[in-house]
Amino acid sequence: MGQLNISKKIQVMGVVNVTPDSFSDGGQFDTIEKAFQHAQQMIADGVDILDIGGESTRPGSQAASEDEEISRTIPLIRAIREVSDISISIDTNKLAVMQQAVDAGASIINSIDALRQENALTVAAELDVPVCMMHMQGSPGTMQKEPYYNDVVFEVKAFLQERIDAALAAGIARHNIIVDPGFGFGKNLQHNLQLLSSLAELKSLGVPILVGLSRKRMIGTILDKPVDQRLYGSIATAVIAAMQGADIVRVHDVAETVDAIAMVRALKQEQI
Ligand code: PT1
């Protein structure tokens, strides 16, 4: 428990959303109970890390308040900790949520704004756990309006390098740094495809790379399929990313991805 596994093994991170489902009115307990069952299934399916988030950050989504995020995520983290020592990541940009989550047993901070908020780097350095810093152009409410880059791969890589430098300067240990190009966060289809096809270029940053492509719109656009029919496309993108050196893949469909990634791992061991 606690430490991120930094061995050669490609890790599967399972997405556990604790955001109330607008189609159910079962209330907070119902939401947490469902997320707990979901987490237990992922553990049974072989997940390496559970990523718990109490605020949706999909394009166009609404922000959650600090109290909402805390009341959704902290009881869930405690409940999982009572039954398992699985690695838990907290998907948040809020400092109080990071602190309470780590106190409750989370061992990774997943920051989609790359710890750019006031004091976030200092708090993360004090917590002394691995942090994932993600690239995003704009903010979730508006980021898909008009994403623009001259050279998306160059600009994302330069941003991630700048965040690595800032993290190191704030006292975050190099072995605790993970980066993520942020698929779908202020990127159009072409930007996403350019990043995916050049993912290996991020390896020279010298830190583990996390990618989240599962069920995203880029898959829906290519396949012309709604979100509940993107499983095979999602598996394909996880494999494409892992083949290019992604160290952690963030996914919804854990059992399927664990098998797909096992094939990549076997192939990579042959190559060494
Ligand atoms: C991600 C990620 C995340 N994605 C990390 N954390 C989401 N580290 C939440 C779409 O285009 O990639 N990396 N936390 C979910 N966000 C999105 C963004 C969901 C875009 C869907 C889309 O459909």
Image (cartoon, helix red, strand yellow):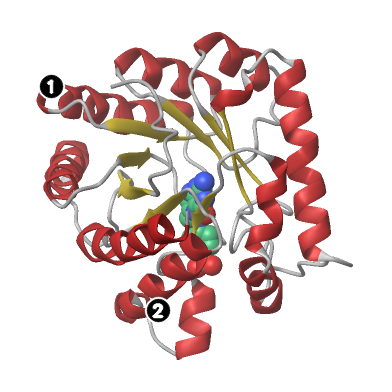
Left or right relative to 37: residue 116: right
Rendering coords of residue 158 (x, y %) = 82, 47
Three-letter code, disc 2: Gly
> What is the crowding at mark 2: few (fewer than 14 residues within 10 Å), some, or many (at least 20)?
some
Toward which corner of the image does residue 85 lie, by quadrant? top left
Residue at (13%, 40%) from the top-left corner? 33
State whether residue 227 is above or below residue 259. below
Q: Do the residues labelled 1 and 2 touch (CB within 8 Å)?
A: no
Answer yes or no: is residue 58 visible: no
Residue at (79%, 64%) from the top-left corner? 152
Q: Residue 82 carries which label?
A: 1
Rendering coords of residue 216 (x, y %) = 47, 69
State whether residue 6 is above or below residue 234. above
Rendering coords of residue 224 (x, y %) = 45, 90
Mark-to-mark CA distance, 1 and 2: 35 Å
Sequence-wise first label, 1 or 2: 1
State whether residue 229 is above or below residue 262. below
Q: Which mark is residue 45?
A: none
Relative to the observer, which residue lies in front, 131 or 186? 131
The residue that label 2 is drawn on is 233
Three-letter code, disc 1: Glu
Left or right relative to 94: residue 191: right
Residue at (42%, 68%) from the top-left corner? 239
Residue at (61%, 68%) from the top-left corner? 196
Rendering coords of residue 198 (x, y %) = 68, 67
State whether residue 22 is above or below residue 101. below
Q: What element carries label 1?
A: helix
